[in-house]
């Protein structure tokens, strides 16, 4: 128990200092003694209980948050705060009223206002907002948890209320038993996550978008659900190209070969999961490479975007754009929605990816409020093209009021950032509550799709949205 408590304190950054740090944690008043400051612990007025009490994975079902020891119908504010690995602060708060017994259960009591309102047991996570604008909450090191500090404050002032109780909740990104293996094989720069057990397990290659680098958090969480997942970097990482200029499909072919030759990966095929620019790369991989049997696209284009794609003696040009069509919002951010050329118009046909050549099925995850590009329009182009060539119609799931950046469950809505392509602050769309619910459902749908087509497991669960 002592080890567990110390781990929580250490994660919150309160176990590095002296006795003063511990006393500050306990909310003790200072007393002067022989010219020095000493601290006397005092008991918190309320008890904040988390169930389950220990650490859990970020994408696991909602944690139960209960406050006991309050006065009947006591008005309080619950406040959550989290710092990422770079020190960026994210905060959320909500106002509540205890029941007649002086207890507050977030699974039963609706929030009366604040960062959100209504019955939202996980609202203090998905409603987190950055202290500084244009900052996205991502997990850079999956080997360490995020520590969420939860506070109970007297009254409905999120800044001035007296502290009544505090707890630290840790959420992991490396599920129990999942193994993390850095990959430097030939030109491939990646990290492989292997699920618990001897294996072999169905394999998935995971690609992110035009931000570059090596993003591991989606792959690590997905591995906890029985998949061997390769988080693959393709630019702006180690010795890979710094910018998205010319892309070579042979690099991605090496990654597919690596997976199919790995003893812990179940062949003879793998699946692909791609977001944004990573999505159209997955479409090209599925269309031209062997060994791919199922592909999931999250808000992706059906044309090759941003940079020309080379494969052997073939070149697919990138879809053109017109920056003169940038629109500015009331907040001063730009929207890219109308910037991209229509791939169905004659001059742009060569950029279309011949996805009818693919051997396996597709799942398109679509945010209907995507301000980055017309994801729903592109998904329907894909459906019509596949059916025109006698292929199976793809599965398309459209989520209302959902923006571009669809992450695993409980990540807060990413509203805006400086886009690497246009070097301007752009808005990505979405309404926080609807976007959060879409992320929970999409995460389930992705797992169901891959289990069905990589493991041949049938499921009758359909999207709730």
Image (spheres, helix red, strand yellow):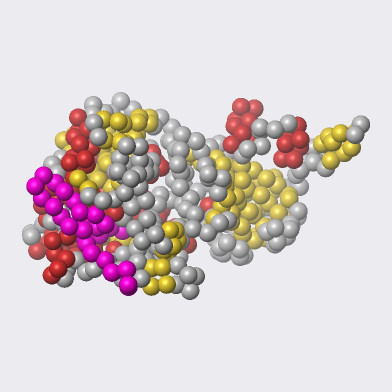
Residue placed farthest to the right in the image?
34
Tell which of 61 and 369 is nearer to you: 369
Residue 110 in magenta stretch? no
Query: Which residue corresponds to the image point at 30% horizontal and 25% vertical from the top-left?
Result: 198
Residue 143 vertical position relative to residue 366 in the rendered view, above or below? above
- Image quadrant holding the C terminus, namely bottom left
Tell which of 93 and 216 is nearer to you: 216
Q: Give the range drawn in magenta.
A: 299-325
Q: Say which quarter of the image contains residue 385.
A: bottom left
Query: Which residue corresponds to the image point at 76% horizontal and 47% vertical from the top-left?
Result: 45
Query: Could you say where residue 83 lies in the image, as x and y percent from the top left?
Result: 56, 46
Query: Could you say where residue 393 lies in the image, as x and y percent from the top left?
Result: 16, 59
Query: Which residue corresponds to the image point at 40% horizontal and 49% vertical from the top-left?
Result: 408
- Image quadrant holding the N terminus, namely top right
**Left or right relative to 168: residue 144:** left
**Left or right relative to 446: residue 104:** right
Residue 272 vertical position relative to residue 132 in the rendered view, above or below? above
Query: Could you say where residue 307 lies in the image, as x and y percent from the top left?
Result: 24, 54
């Amino acid at each position: 128990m002592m080890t567990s408590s110390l781990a929580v304190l250490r994660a919150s950054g309160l176990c590095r200092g002296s006795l003063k740090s511990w006393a500050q944690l306990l909310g003790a008043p200072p007393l002067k003694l022989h010219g020095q400051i000493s601290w006397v612990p005092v008991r918190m007025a309320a008890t904040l209980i988390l169930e389950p009490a220990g650490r859990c994975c970020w994408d696991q079902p909602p944690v139960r948050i209960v406050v006991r020891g309050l006065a009947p119908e006591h008005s309080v504010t619950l406040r959550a705060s989290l710092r990422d690995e770079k020190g960026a602060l994210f905060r959320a708060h909500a106002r509540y009223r205890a029941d007649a017994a002086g207890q507050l259960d977030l699974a039963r009591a609706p929030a009366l206002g604040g960062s959100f309102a209504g019955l939202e047991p996980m609202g203090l996570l998905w409603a987190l907002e950055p202290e500084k604008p244009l900052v996205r909450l991502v997990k850079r090191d999956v080997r360490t948890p995020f520590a969420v500090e939860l506070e109970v404050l007297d009254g409905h002032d999120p800044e001035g209320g007296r502290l009544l109780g505090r707890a630290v909740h840790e959420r992991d990104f490396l599920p129990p038993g999942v193994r993390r293996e850095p990959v430097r094989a030939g030109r491939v720069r990646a990290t492989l996550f292997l699920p618990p057990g001897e294996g072999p397990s169905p394999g998935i290659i995971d690609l992110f978008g035009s931000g570059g680098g090596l993003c591991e958090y989606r792959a690590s969480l997905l591995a906890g659900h029985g998949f061997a997942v390769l988080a693959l970097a393709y630019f702006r990482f180690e010795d890979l190209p710094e910018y998205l200029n010319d892309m070579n499909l042979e690099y991605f072919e090496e990654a597919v070969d690596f997976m199919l030759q790995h003893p812990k990966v179940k062949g003879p095929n793998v699946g692909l999961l791609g977001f944004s620019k990573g999505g159209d790369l997955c479409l090209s991989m599925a269309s031209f490479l062997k060994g791919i049997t199922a592909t999931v696209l999250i808000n992706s284009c059906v044309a090759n975007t941003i940079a020309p794609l080379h494969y052997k003696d073939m070149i697919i040009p990138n879809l053109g754009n017109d920056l003169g069509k940038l629109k500015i919002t009331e907040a001063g951010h730009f929207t890219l929605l109308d910037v991209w050329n229509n791939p169905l118009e004659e001059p742009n046909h060569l950029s279309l990816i011949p996805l009818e050549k693919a051997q396996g099925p597709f799942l398109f995850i679509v945010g209907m409020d995507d301000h980055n590009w017309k994801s729903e329009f592109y998904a329907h182009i894909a459906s019509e093209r596949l059916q025109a060539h006698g292929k199976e119609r793809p599965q398309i799931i459209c989520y209302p009021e959902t923006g571009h950046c669809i992450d695993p469950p409980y990540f807060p809505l990413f509203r805006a950032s400086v886009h690497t392509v246009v070097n301007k602050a752009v808005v990505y769309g979405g309404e926080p509550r609807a976007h959060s619910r879409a992320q929970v459902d999409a995460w389930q749908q992705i797992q169901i799709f891959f289990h069905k087509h990589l493991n041949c497991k049938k499921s009758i669960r359909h999207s709730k949205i």
